[in-house]
């Protein structure tokens, strides 16, 4: 199956919603996290498709990161709206932090991971420390919140491009 | 000194025990790996990187800073779990 940029964009929104539903149901945090990362991959593919329609990228967020223009914050609309430079800078840092979180927590092999393996993975990177309550749920929420910020940013840019 | 080298130098000056892997493919992207990031939130990590680039002894122009796509800050344990390249 081949998709257009618009289809990738719509898929990013659907995957984000589905990730939230799986997370909220408690049915499986590995699948919730995998689906959240997929939402990010979809929005990055949407922008990558705009640049190169022959793009047949792998499931590798790092490759997609460097292939996309999503993180080149277009400051012109913000500047014209009178948004202060410091506020634009903080917005940019927050977006990069969200991408950092996805790089840390998402892995293409999460789709194969039983919850016990996810637990071992999250523990191995020190993400259990200081967490009270359900550590898997907390880390799943961290990833989904980061993914949401990226998908939202991508959605805003995508909508602006269409105008 | 090209942009990739400037960015690497900026990061080395601000992050202890840093291993840096950058690529320049129509923009700079990559990783900075350091035990210094243990226990540090993603936001604090990116603020550190932002400060390192802005306050570097090797001056980067606004145009050069716009060429920096994304640099992930990882601990050694986090880097080891990434998909093999």
Image (tube, helix red, strand yellow):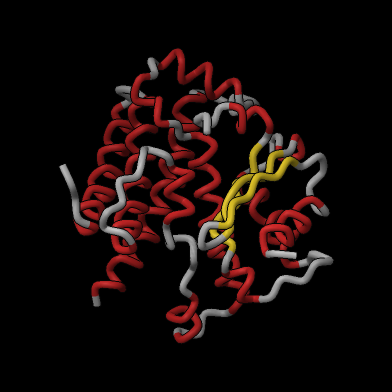
Q: Residue B1, image x and y in percent? A: 75, 65
Task: Give the camera-side residue of A109 and B48.
Answer: A109
- With A42 as the anchor, is B15 left or right in this view? right
Q: Quadrant of the C terminus of chain A?
A: bottom left
Q: Is residue A125 above or below residue B62?
A: above
Q: Residue A59, image x and y in percent? A: 37, 38
Task: Give the camera-side residue of A50 and A153.
Answer: A50
Q: How many marks?
A: 0
Q: Is residue B58 above or below residue A36?
A: below
Q: Residue A135, image x and y in percent? A: 52, 25
Q: Residue at x 46, y 81 (%)?
A: A76
Task: Give the camera-side residue of A148 and B14.
Answer: B14
Farthest left residue?
A: A1
Q: Is residue B20 above or below residue A74?
A: above
User: For residue A5, what is the image quadrant?
Assistant: bottom left
Q: Is residue A76 above or below residue A51?
A: below
User: For residue B20, what is the image quadrant?
Assistant: top right
Q: Residue at x 52, y 80 (%)?
A: A83
Q: Quadrant of the N terminus of chain A?
A: top left
Q: Residue A4, image x and y in percent? A: 19, 55
Q: Residue at x 78, y 66 (%)?
A: B55
Farthest top residue?
A: A116
Q: Residue at x 39, y 61 (%)?
A: A153
Task: Give the camera-side residue of B35 and A139.
Answer: B35
């Amino acid at each position: 199956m081949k998709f257009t940029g618009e289809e990738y964009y719509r898929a990013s929104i659907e995957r984000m919603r589905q990730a939230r539903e799986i997370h909220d149901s408690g049915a499986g945090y590995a699948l919730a996290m995998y689906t959240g990362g997929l939402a990010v991959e979809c929005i990055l593919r949407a922008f990558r498709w705009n640049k190169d329609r022959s793009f047949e990228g792998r499931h590798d967020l790092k490759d997609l990161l460097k292939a996309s223009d999503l993180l080149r914050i277009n400051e012109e609309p913000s500047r014209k709206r009178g948004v202060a430079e410091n506020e634009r800078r903080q917005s940019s840092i927050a977006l990069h932090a969200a991408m950092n979180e996805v790089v840390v927590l998402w892995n293409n092999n999460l789709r194969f991971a039983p919850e016990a393996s996810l637990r071992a993975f999250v523990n191995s990177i020190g993400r259990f420390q200081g967490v009270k309550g359900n550590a898997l749920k907390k880390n799943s929420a961290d990833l989904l919140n980061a993914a949401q910020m990226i998908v939202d940013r991508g959605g805003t840019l995508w909508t602006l491009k269409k105008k | 000194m090209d942009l990739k080298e400037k960015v690497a130098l900026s990061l080395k000056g601000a992050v202890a025990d840093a291993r840096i892997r950058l690529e320049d493919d129509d923009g700079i992207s990559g990783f900075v790996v350091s035990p210094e990031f243990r226990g540090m939130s993603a936001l604090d990590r990116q603020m550190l990187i932002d400060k390192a680039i802005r306050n570097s002894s090797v001056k980067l122009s606004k145009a050069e800073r716009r060429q920096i796509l994304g640099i992930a800050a990882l601990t050694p344990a986090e880097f080891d779990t990434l998909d093999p390249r």
